Amino acid sequence: MKAGDRVRVKESVTFYSHPKHRNQAFDAKGLEGAVIKVMEDWNGKPISPTLPILVEFPVEGAKKPFRAHFKADELELLDG
């Protein structure tokens, strides 16, 4: 995966920080968004983060989109 790819959450992943469900369990399965960054280095040095893929999801009525980190096996690439 690379920045700009469209993805869908294919696994059940629970968040408590979603803007519309603050402090409540929110299952992100099925959400579609765009990859913002794949974390591979920090200040030019290689790293191996546990959740390397940063994805941004639009949230209707929210000031900012929802961003979250994922493992590659929790996401599926979408065509187009």
Image: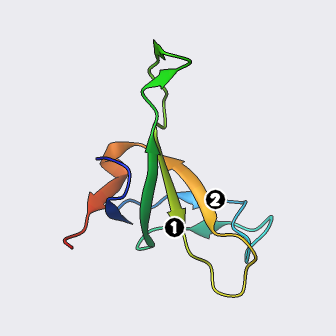
Identify the residue position indicated by label 2 in the image. Answer: 15
What residue is rendered at 68% in x and 66% in y? 25
Q: Position of residue 44 (x, y in %)?
A: 49, 15
- Is 50 located above or below residue 11 in the figure? above
From the viewer's perspective, is 67 left or right of 10?
Answer: right
Instruction: Depth check: give the residue in front, 15 or 3.
Output: 3
The vertical placement of 51 against 20, above or below, is above
Left or right side of 2 for 13: right
Packing grade of label 2 (10 A; few <14, some 14-19, many >=20) is some
Name the residue located 42 percent from the left edge and 27 percent from the top edge. 40
Q: Earlier in the sequence, mark 2 or mark 1?
A: 2
Estimate the x, y position of residue 64 in percent, counting from the top left: 71, 70
Expressed as whole percent of the image width and height from the top left, the position of residue 57 reads: 53, 69
Secondary structure beneath dot 1 equals loop
> Looking at the picture, which amino acid does disc 2 mark?
Phe
Task: Classify the position of the C terminus by image quarter.
Answer: bottom left
Q: Position of residue 76 (x, y in %)?
A: 27, 60
- Depth check, front residue: 4 or 70: 4
Gap in angstroms between the C-alphas marked 2 and 1: 7 Å
Q: Nearer the viewer, residue 42 or 30?
A: 42
Q: Secondary structure at mark 2?
A: strand
Residue furthest top in the image: 45
Q: Which residue is mark 1?
A: 28
Farthest residue toward the bottom?
61
Q: Are marks 2 and 1 in contact (CB under 8 Å)?
A: yes
Corner quadrant of residue 32: bottom left
Q: Is residue 71 above or below residue 14?
A: above
Which residue is depicted at the point 75% across and 68% down?
24
**Amino acid type, callout 1:** Ala
Picture residue at 38% right of the left edge, 50% below the top: 3
